[in-house]
Image (cartoon, helix red, strand yellow):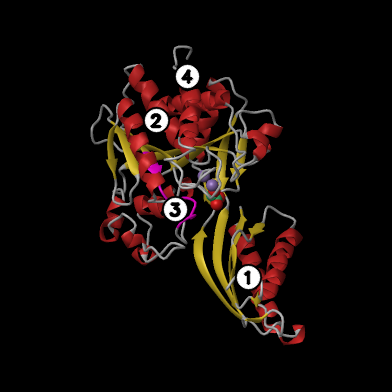
Amino acid sequence: MNDLPPGGARAVARCDALGVAPYSDMAGGLYRGYLTPAYTAAQQALAGWMEAAGMAVRRDPAANLVGRYPGEVADAPALLIGSHIDSVRDAGRYDGPLGVMLGIECVDALRTRGRRMAFPIEVYAFGDEEGSRFPAAMLTSRAVAGTLDPAALDLADGEGVALADAGVDVAAYLDAARAPGSAMAYLEAHIEQGPVLEADGLAVGTVTGIAAQLRYEVTVRGMAGHAGTTAMRLRRDALAGAAAMVLAIEQVARCDNSDLVATVGRIEALPGAANVIPGEVRFTIDVRSGDAARRDRAARAILDRLREIAEARDLELATELIHDLPASPCDPALMDLMDDALADAGQPVRRLVSGAGHDAMVMAALCPTAMLFIRCKGGVSHNPAEHVDPADAEVALRVMLGFIERLGAAA
Ligand code: GLV
Ligand code: MN
Ligand code: MN
């Protein structure tokens, strides 16, 4: 393996290159929303890198960028390698793009060695994993996996721009679906976004599965009024009510003493003026656990508490479920292959579960999935301080190449 180019370091450097304008929509930091100018610019850069690695590049109807490296058997089901290039607001540079860059590096390493697998390899740069622009998530991988309900495309972003006007043909969107049987497996490499590998002194680990997620959009309505003249006992303050709700949500999750987590990550008070009692508040709730029944139980408890608080404060409450993803175990046979690839690369074998969501949990509806986690500094993610050691990315690349070879031998 000493003949390998330093693809892991290059993968990290390319993520860094995409961390600034024109690949970011935000001054002084990274935000790359689905279908924004930064998204298009990033796709242009990626297309060049995919072509240089020997791939034919296309943009599919869901605006995913896809590079294809042919196999020896033209119509054989493809190995898909993917991750996402959209980001959260004020993001780190590696959550998502690193998996795409490593996919490109795998193909580049094979091309450099004159190696073609029996099966084609397709690298997917997915577009909407984070749900940071439109109130949905994983739209583009759901389109590819064939699980997207067309009604889910009736969306607008925070500025009121409809998905249909954002640069995709919504009528053709579902044509991004792959034919069942056209994919042999899906492989995703991703930073761990947690501290386990670092604590254990490991560069990489085999993922066993991904926690189940629920996401709600909540609207609390009270009555806007004058902040100077409305007596406290006469107020119907939507923000004070929402504050009680946020603490109740935290309380439900803390009392569970398990892997259950619940988060209010976005909150907006209207009309949003210092001298006006907030008449309306909107916020999101994200609930996750490896155990779907536990997640659902907690979500019911949370919604019950919200109703109690709304009633006690004479507020109107509306909740909408915007995201429901079941737990997604990785394929046991592929986990074994990944463990073997870890051992081949001289790495201790370590398995761990993912609390973060990934496109892999959607792609599991299409084909068996495998994930490789890569250590990130301090477990920090969704934060500009996110950091990956290029040497760890190098290890990940070796493991991925070993996994591909083992997949070829097992096919
Ligand atoms: C994606 O990063 C998620 O887990 O929400
Ligand atoms: Mn993320
Ligand atoms: Mn991610």
Query: Most prominent secondary structure in the magenta stretch?
Result: loop
Residue that mark 3 sits on: 138
Residue that mark 2 sits on: 104
Image: 243 above or below 182: below
Q: From the top left corner, tell me how far across and down residue 211 is, in percent.
A: 58, 51
Q: Which residues are magenta?
A: 124-133
Q: From the top left corner, tell me how far across and down residue 220 is, in percent.
A: 60, 76
Residue at the top extreme, as displayed: 2
Circles 2 and 4, Cβ within 8 Å, touching? The answer is no
Residue 126 within the magenta-colored segment of the rendering = yes
Is residue 410 something one can see in this rendering? no
Residue that mark 4 sits on: 6
- Mark sitting earlier along the chain (4/1): 4
Residue that mark 1 sits on: 300
Q: From the top left corner, tell me how far across and down residue 121 is, in percent.
A: 34, 33
Residue that appears at 32% across and 31% down: 48
What's under tag 1, amino acid-wise?
Arg
Query: Could you give the CA–CA distance between mark 2 and mark 4, rounded to whole angstroms?
Result: 13 Å
* Mark 3 secondary-structure assignment: loop
Query: Could you give the CA–CA distance between mark 2 and mark 1, rounded to whole angstroms?
Result: 43 Å
Pointer 3 residue Cβ closer than 8 Å to ligand 1: no
Q: Quadrant of the C terminus?
A: top left
Q: Relative to 324, is 166 on the left or the right?
A: left
Q: From the top left corner, tell me how far across and down residue 303 is, in percent.
A: 63, 72
* Mark 2 secondary-structure assignment: helix
